[in-house]
């Protein structure tokens, strides 16, 4: 089943993409669909695992230096800090 998708792109990009699609003998929609299939297929088949680097010793020494009581909501605290900083 096909479904419409609205994209907002620079006019020049759209024009060049249409020209490329015409040169390939396909529609812009099929070009975009095939690109999305390629992206999702590669991601699905071979998920790339990021190799974590070990933390520096100086950072590891900081463990336990900050204390807080009760529940700590990171998102809430971040929101408060940003509101204070930018006066929102």
Image (tube, rainbow, N blue to C red):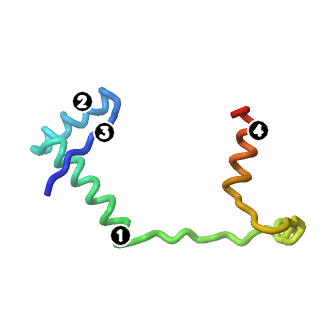
Circle 3 Cα neighbour tier, 10 Å, few/some/many (<14 / 14–19 / ≥20): few
Q: Are marks 2 and 1 in contact (CB under 8 Å)?
A: no
In the image, is residue 7 above or below residue 73? Answer: above
Q: Earlier in the sequence, mark 3 or mark 2?
A: 3
Residue depth check, mark 1 versus mark 4: number of the one nearer the observer: 4
Asked whether, in this view, residue 16 is left or right of residue 44, the answer is left
Q: Mark 1 or mark 2, which is nearer the start of the sequence?
A: 2
Q: Report helix, strand or loop for mark 3.
A: loop
Crowding at mark 1 (Cα within 10 Å: few <14, some 14-19, many 20+): few
Front of the two marks 1 and 3: 3
Q: Are marks 4 and 2 in contact (CB under 8 Å)?
A: no
Question: In the rendered image, which residue does mark 2 sit on?
Answer: 15
Between circles 4 and 2, the one closer to the viewer is 4
Q: Can the viewer see residue 46 in this picture?
A: yes
Label 4 and label 3: CA atoms lie apart by 35 Å
Instruction: Say which quarter of the image contains residue 37.
Output: bottom left
Compare marks 1 and 4 and give the one earlier in the sequence. Answer: 1
Q: Is residue 25 above or below residue 8?
A: below
Disc 1 versus disc 3: distance between alpha carbons?
24 Å
* Labels 1 and 4 touching (C-beta < 8 A): no
Residue at mark 1 to residue at mark 4: CA–CA distance: 42 Å
Quadrant location of residue 40? bottom left
Residue bearing the label numbered 3: 7
- What residue is at 87 percent from the left and 65 percent from the top? 66
- Front-most of residues 46 and 1: 1
**Residue position marked by numbered label 1 in the rendering:** 44
Disc 4, SS: helix
Would you name the residue on which mark 4 appears? 84
């Amino acid at each position: 089943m096909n479904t419409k998708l609205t994209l907002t792109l620079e006019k020049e990009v759209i024009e060049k993409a249409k020209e490329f699609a015409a040169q390939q003998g396909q529609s812009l929609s099929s070009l975009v669909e095939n690109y999305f299939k390629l992206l999702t297929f590669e991601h699905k088949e071979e998920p790339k695992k990021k190799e974590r680097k070990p933390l520096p010793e100086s950072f590891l020494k900081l463990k336990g230096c900050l204390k807080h009581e009760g529940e700590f909501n990171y998102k809430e605290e971040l929101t408060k800090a940003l509101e204070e900083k930018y006066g929102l």
